[in-house]
Amino acid sequence: MENYGVVILPSLLMGLLARLYMIRIDHRQYPSYPQGLLSHLTLGVIAAGLGSVALPALLSKEYSAVTFLALAAQQFRDVRSMERQSLDNIEPTELVPRGTAYIEDIAKAFEARNYMVIITALMTSIAIYFAHWMKQPRFVQIMVGIVAGLFVMVFLKGMLKRQSVAEIAEVRIGKIYFEGPLLMVNGIVIMNIGLKSTRKIYEEKGVAVEIVPKNVDAKATLANTGQRQAIQHNVAVHLGIQKDVDEPEFTPIARRNAQDGTIIMVIVPTEVDRELLVAAVEGTPVLETAKRKPFKAKGTQMNRS
């Protein structure tokens, strides 16, 4: 195959399209959206270029060029570190921090999506070359490559898709009330509030949710403090929060009922919208670092015995 342009160009475009396909999910997590968008698109072009030239380099016996893939892997690990560093740097400015577990999850996602671009571009180029080897017309070669790239793109996105809280738990509105100075929700003590003015604000504007795990694995996952912190941050982002830096009594709190594993979360939002509150909790991603599967582990041990 002498004209590698028919392989490289469609593969490059499909790789870039794969990165654009995932950008929609990423933008809410950028420290600064316009600059973050540009940097990740630029890295997507680089990743797509590496994936698209890998096969032509091998066919041309330019084996040294393939070593750039190893350099790219190192570069994308550095991207993960930079993303983590960036989010760590702005963490003290958040009224409701993301938490280290959420930050690590975001950084991993950005790294993995660059690999998705390389794989998409590479598989597109392989499909085009295969169609050329089958002596198909050039237009058919390109179409085969596009179809293969789209298939790989959708498959990888499905594989990288994270669970949400809605998939592992039932979320319902809780009732806020006081027993003396104790803030209570559905019989669970949340905290002690001494000021009457603060208690009045909770009674007027406070909202609460009860997150009921669907199984043993979900119960163990929701027990993770990093997962709870991610839920609190996500809710604060969507509903706003009525607090300032020196008002810890208005910080969202998620308490765990040790008896049944239910999580109770209370927040005083800027706008009281209970439907949005439930949607924000349900839409919070389940963090990879928080996932626990004790039930499956027990089943494995039972099968071995």
Image (tube, grey):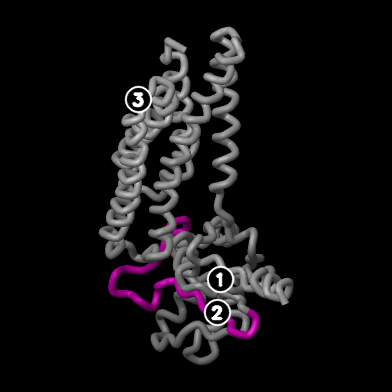
Identify the residue at image location x=49%, y=24%.
Answer: 125
Label 1 Cα neighbours within 10 Å, binned few <14 / some 14-19 / many ≥20 = many
Identify the residue at image location x=51%, y=62%.
Answer: 272
Question: What amino acid is at disc 2?
Answer: Arg
Mark nearer the N terminus (1 vs 3): 3
Give yes or no for residue 259 being in the magenta stretch: yes
106 relative position to 139: left or right? left
- Residue 98's label in the rendered image is none
Secondary structure of residue under mark 1: helix
Specify start and end residues of the magenta stretch as a single range.
237-260
Q: Would you name the residue on which mark 3 appears?
A: 62
Q: Would you name the residue on which mark 2 appears?
A: 256
Mark nearer the N terminus (2 vs 3): 3
Identify the residue at image location x=45%, y=30%.
Answer: 15
Question: What amino acid is at disc 1?
Answer: Leu
Q: Marks 1 and 2: CB-CB under 8 Å?
A: yes
